[in-house]
Image: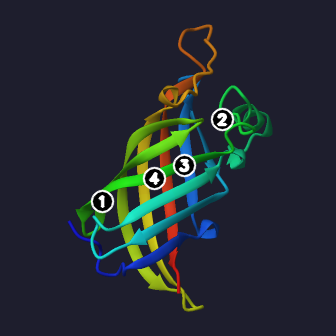
Amino acid sequence: MTLPKEITPGTWNLDMAHSEIGFSVRHAGISKVRGRFTQAQAEARVGQSLADSSVHATVSTASFDSGDANRDNHVRGADFFDVEQYPEMTFRGTHIEGDGEEYTLTGDLTIKGVTRPVELEVEFTGVAVDPFGATRAGFSAETEISRKEFGLTWNAALEAGGVLVSDKVKINLEAALVKEA
């Protein structure tokens, strides 16, 4: 269980302009609604080993964007994220294991004041130096959560049976991290 050799010790920060925090949820049992969060900060402190490394991220819940203003306003409201009372959700990594390109990042996800452990399956996608001299590292990650476990319980029954919004939410991350000089 080792770090990729291209990832050197130091602090790496999320470049949100080149990253995406996405999600998908089943709607009415027949289609998927996709969206993203447009404002976030994350920091990876890389040590000499995985055990010496850490990850912490903060996402603005008000930056929720599914492409539909009515739905976005509802989800930002008290039925879901309640952004006035809970303006952020956070992730704090507690354990990293893996090798080469495949890793499992375990951590505590906090949404709406509720903290639960989650596991992200992470793929290391490489390191490059950009034309401005900044060293960048890329990662893809995904997980699935139960929104009810985080107190996001609003729903509506469908006339034909079932509910409007599924409990399971798939989270997909495309992250570009930049090493501090």
Report which residue position mark 2 lands on: 81
Element assignment for label 3 = strand
Identified by mark 1, the residue type is Tyr
Tell me if I can see residue 37 in this picture. Answer: yes
Where is residue 125 drawn, in percent x and y?
Answer: 39, 70
Look at the numbered discs 4 and 2 and tell me whether their residues touch, using CB distance below 8 Å.
no
Please report the residue visible at 48 percent of the width from the left and 38 percent of the height from the top.
115
| Residue linked to disc 4 | 92
Camera-near label (3 vs 1) is 3
Give the image quarter of residue 45: bottom left
Distance between mark 3 and mark 1 Cα atoms: 20 Å
Q: Position of residue 89 (x, y in %)?
A: 58, 45
Dot 3 or dot 2: first in sequence order is: 2
- The residue located at (36%, 62%) in the rendering is 123
CA gap between label 1 and label 2 equals 29 Å
Determine the secondary structure under disc 2.
loop
The x and y percentages for residue 92 are 45, 53
- Label 3 sits on what residue type? Thr
